[in-house]
Every structure is written in C-alpha cells, then in structure tokens.
Image (spheres, rainbow, N blue to C red):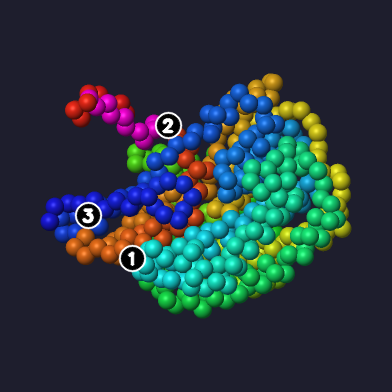
Amino acid sequence: MPRQTIVIDPVTRIEGHSKISIHLDEQGHVEEAYFHVGQFRGFEKFCEGRPFYEMPSLMARICGICPVSHLIASAKACDAILAVRIPENAARLRTILNLAQIVQSHALSFFYLSSADLLLGMDSDPGKRNIFGVMQANPEMARDGIRLRQFGQQIIEGLAGKRIHPSWVVPGGVNDPLTAERRDHILQGIPEAIAITARTLDWFKTGMERFREEIRTFANFPTLFMGLVGADGGLEFYDGKLRFLDAGGHIVADGLEGDAYDQYIAEIAHPWTYLKTSYYKPLGYPDGVYRVGPLARMNLIDHCGTPRAGQEWAEFRELDRGAVLSSFYFHYARLIEILYALEKMEQLLHSPDILDTNVRAHARANNAEGVGVSEAPRGTLIHHYKVDRDGLITWANLIIATGHNNAAMNRGVLQVARHFVHGNKLSEGMLNRVEAVIRTFDPCLSCSTHADGRMALKIELRGHAGELLDVMM
C-alpha cells in the first residue's frame, strides 16, 4: 500500500486549536506523528511600549481559563522591577487566588474534558463522549464537576471582583484586603468541595485497572521533571525555587532562582508548529526534555504539607520506584492537587493576620528588568520583562507550561499512535486515544503559542485557476 497520512483535525476537548498528523509507511505502520499548533498570538510583541504597571491586567487577558496564573507571574515580575518586598498578607491573598484557580482549572480538565473517556471508555460512542454523556451516565459526577469548578470561580470573584480577567493583583501586592464576610463565605464552601474531591479520587483509583494499556502507553517514557518547590521541599504554587528531577527520582538541580532561568532553560522552534519547545540547557536537546504540571509536581516534592493530600500523595508515589512516568497519571495528580489547594486555602484563611489591611507596597521602577515565576495549573509559568528609564516595556519573554511539555506531548502522540493505530484497520477508538494522550497534559494553546525565531508559516499566492504564483516562507 502507498504511504498515507491520517490527520485528526481538530483535536477535541482541549483549550485552543490544533491537529495531529500520523504518517504511515507502505505496510500501514506508524512511522512518525506530530502535534501541530496552528494559532499564533504573539503577546510578547504586543507588550512593547506599554507601561510596566499595566502588565498584570494586560497579561490576565491572554487566557480565559487561567488568567490568574498570568496575573500573578506578571505581578511578580513587576515586583522585581519595583525592587520591593510585598506585604506578607498580600502574598497570602495572592496564594489563595492562585489556589482557587488550581481548583477551577483542574475541575474543568478532569470533569469537563477527560471524565467522558474515563467514565464511558475510550471506545464509547463519540456522540456521547462529552460532558452531556457524563450527565446522562453519572449525574452525580457531572454535578460534582460543575460545583467544584463553580466554587473555585466564586473564590476568584469574591477576592478579585470578577471570575475572568481580574485585575486585583497589582505590582506591589493586591488592590484591597480580604473582608471577614468574604473569608467566612469561602470557608463555608470548603467542606463540600473536599468531599467532592475525596469521592472522585476514590472513584478514579478503583477504576484505574481498566486502563492498564493506556497507562502503559500514554507518554510513558523517561524524561526530566521541573517545577517549583518550597523551602522545605513541599508543594508550592506561588513561590519557591526551581528543581529538576530525573526519571529515576534523583534530583538533577535544586534551589535554582527563577530570575536566572535562561541559564538552565532554552527554547527551540520546530517547522510544524507555532508552539516553542523548552529543554534543560545543560543536557541539550533532546536529552534535556522535561515535563511540568501536576505529574511533575507530585514527582518533585518531598511532601505535600496538608494532611489529606499528603496521604493521597504517599499512595501516588507507590505507583513507581522512581518518578511516576506515565502521563495518564496527570489525571490522578490533578485530583490530589485540588485536595491540597482546598486544604491549603483553609489553613491560610485561618491565619491570624489574613484580614490585615496592609496589602500593597508602592514604588516606582527601580530595576531595568524583572522575572516572575509561579505554578499555573498546567505547570511552571515564567514572565520576564525589560523596561526603559520611563518604565515602558522594551522586551518581554513568556515561557508557558504547555511549551515546557511540547516535546513530551509529541513523543506521547507517537508512542500512542504506534501502539494503537494500524493503517489497514482504523477505528474511532484508536484515534480517540491519540487525542486523549494530549488531554492528559491539558494543554492551553491560547497561552502558549508565542513563536521564537523563524516562523513555521508558509504563504502561497495562487491565481484564479489555482496555479501557484508565488511562495513566501
């Protein structure tokens, strides 16, 4: 048989627009596979010439799903430009806001985008393999997912004024303090949210045996892992230092400062996608490929820091002798992180100074550049800005979690395609598994498509009869 290409366009149940191409040889075996991201948004260039203090609210508009992540990383970069130490209570409030986003975004990924595969099966009717099919098959699970996401969004709205694109986090801290009424309202909802997460974890763990083949093949290979850890090695989303871990569970580098990221993280562009690929500089590419996000964070940390999440994390680490390698377990890790976020918010809201009204430091631009690093739902997020003497942005670089994961996603697509796809006998379930490995990473393509260097763009000029007149690369 002649060589063939199978194209999955679009990849469904992810944020953004992409496609997958699977290339078969003459025998119908998978030879190569690619994850293509065709959208380009170029935020780094949009920023140039803007006052640096506008950046947090501007960057929050990159994405409607994880605006808080960009808001916080951007504000931290601006704090560095101000050269201030923000008030302790401002850091607590930023942390709570970030944890609320972890809850709502992870709930979206697990319940809305992936639960249909897990509940109904990878080979189920594609017409029902969606949140509406979940509602029909398991109404309680659907309600739980909607309620959990709603709770996270309500916390964001209560703190920051609105659920999407808030501007409450500002250079130097936050705009206004927490009130007792808002604190008590959040605390009232936490027990219900914890109960939802706990029963979902129990359901997921009892059903993992059904996905033995997917666990074995869903981006299950050695890579490095990267993310923030706290000063005590604990799970950290707002602050901390960067750590790299190898597939055996051994620390490769630790205590790395975020503002020196360019010493150990490099990026390359590929001709088939607008999505950049990051790698660990000392090992080069491809040996330095790493993963970020929930799976990476569960591998990197020494402990969780909250009781129920800590117990679940201990069970999680029993899955493998070294690092847990299968990206199927991103789903498991997300549920543990939701539990942690809820417990940690409860702890922070009981802090004696949580209602302190000192929540912002004021200054002018004192440094020519600043870097902000935080953990977004999908992984480590880096914002780096340079300013002129008037505080106007002259250069910006954003490294997004999905870019960190790009090489692993491409390898995962190839691994799944080689295992499940056979050119002489295609089935919808085979191709759904190729998409499902991407969904484990929960990519956010609107956030991450900031091309570097030569663009993966080809423009053809054709006449009225379809003849090729000119090509621009």
Q: Specify the amino acid type for callout 2.
A: Gly
Q: In which quarter of the image is residue 458?
A: top left
Which disc is residue 24 wearing? 3
Number of marks: 3
Q: Where is residue 79 in the image (x, y as percent from the top left)?
A: 72, 37
Which mark is drawn over residue 264? none
Sequence-first disc among 2 and 3: 3
Query: How dense is the environment of label 2, judged by Cα within 10 Å: few (below 14), some, or many (20 and up)?
Result: few
**Could one spot residue 26 in this view of the protein?**
yes
Q: Is residue 398 magenta?
A: no
Judge whether 455 appears above or below 199 on screen.
above
Q: Earlier in the sequence, mark 2 or mark 1?
A: 1
Task: Please name the residue shown 70% across and 69% down the image.
Answer: 192
Residue 429: numbered disc: 1
Residue 247 vertical position relative to residue 82 in the rendered view, above or below: below
Q: Quadrant of the N terminus?
A: bottom left
Question: Circle 3 — which element?
Answer: strand
Question: Start and end of the magenta stretch?
Answer: 454-463
Residue 375 is situated, as x and y percent measured from the top left of the image, at: 61, 51
- Mark 1 is surrounded, within 10 Å at the Cα level, by few (under 14), some (14 to 19) or many (20 or more) other residues, namely some
Q: Does 21 sit left or right of 164 as displayed?
A: left
In magenta segment, residue 460? yes
Residue 62 % position (x, y) = 57, 40
Q: Which of 410 and 179 is in front in this view?
A: 179
User: Taking 32 as reference, is 387 left or right?
Assistant: right
| Residue located 53% across and 48% down the image | 401
Give the residue at x 18% y 28%: 465
Q: Distance between the residues labelled 2 and 3?
A: 30 Å
Gap in angstroms between the C-alphas marked 1 and 3:
18 Å
Instruction: Report the residue marked by disc 2.
Output: 453
Q: Main secondary structure of the magenta part?
A: loop
Q: Name the amino acid type tagged 1.
A: Gly
